[in-house]
Image (cartoon, rainbow, N blue to C red):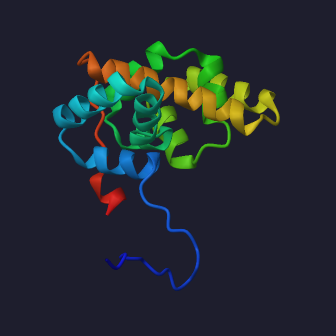
Amino acid sequence: MKKNTFINRHKQPTSLGGVETAAKIMSLMKTNMASTIIGDIAKQDQKLAIEIQENMFLFDSLAKIDDRSIQKILQKTPNDQLAVALKNSNKIVQDKFYKNMSKRAKKRLSDDMEMLGDLKTSDIELAQKNITRSARKMADAGEIILEINRQEFS
C-alpha cells in the first residue's frame, strides 16, 4: 500500500490555527455560541479558555464600544491602572476614554501618565488585560455591551 505524503515545496513548516486564530473565529460567532464553546474548552483547559477570551477582545477594541459602557468601565477602573494601560496606547483609545471623563479627571489622568515615565511593555499589557477582563465580566453580567467590529477579521 502506498503512503500518501504531503510535499511542502518551500520546506517550511506551515502553522495552522493557534490561540489568535481561534479567538478570531470565536469573535465571529454569536455571543451565546462562543460562550458555550469557551465553557467547553474551559472544562478541559482553563488556561487555554482564558487565553482565547483575552485574544477575542483586546484593549484597543474598547475604542469601538459605546460611551455609556466606557463610563461604567471608568467607574470600576483604578486611576493608576488606567494611566498605565493608556500609556503608549493608540490615540483613538486614549481619546475614547478622555471623551468620557470630566476635564478635571482628564487633566489628572494626563498628569499621571506623564509622571509614569518609561514602563515595561509587560506592565502596560497586564494593566490592559485587567481592564478588558473587567469589561468582559461587566458584559457577562449585562452591565455593558461589548461590540466587536467583525470587519477586523475579514
Q: Residue at x 33, y 22 (%)?
A: 43
Toward the bottom, the furthest residue is: 9
Q: Residue at x 70, y 34 (%)?
A: 122
**Could you say which is closer to the camera, residue 55 or residue 16?**
16
The percent coordinates of residue 4 (x first, y second) are: 36, 76
The tally of labels here is 0
**Quarter of the picture holding the C terminus:** bottom left
Work out which residue is located at the far front of the displayed protein and give it: 1
Q: Is residue 96 above or below residue 84?
A: below
Q: Quadrant of the N terminus?
A: bottom left
In screen coordinates, is 81 left or right of 136?
Answer: right
Query: Could you say where residue 59 lies in the image, as x and y percent from the top left?
Result: 49, 38
Identified at 44% across, 20% down, the residue is 134
Along the line of sight, the residue nearer the viewer: 51 or 139: 51
Q: Position of residue 16 (x, y in %)?
A: 43, 60
Q: In front: 154, or 34?
A: 34
The residue drawn where x is 53% and y is 23% is: 130
Q: Is residue 132 left or right of residue 22?
A: right
Residue 42 is drawn in which quadrant?
A: top left
Q: Please state which of residues 52 and 56 is positioned toward the viewer in this rendering.
A: 52
Q: Position of residue 98 (x, y in %)?
A: 51, 33
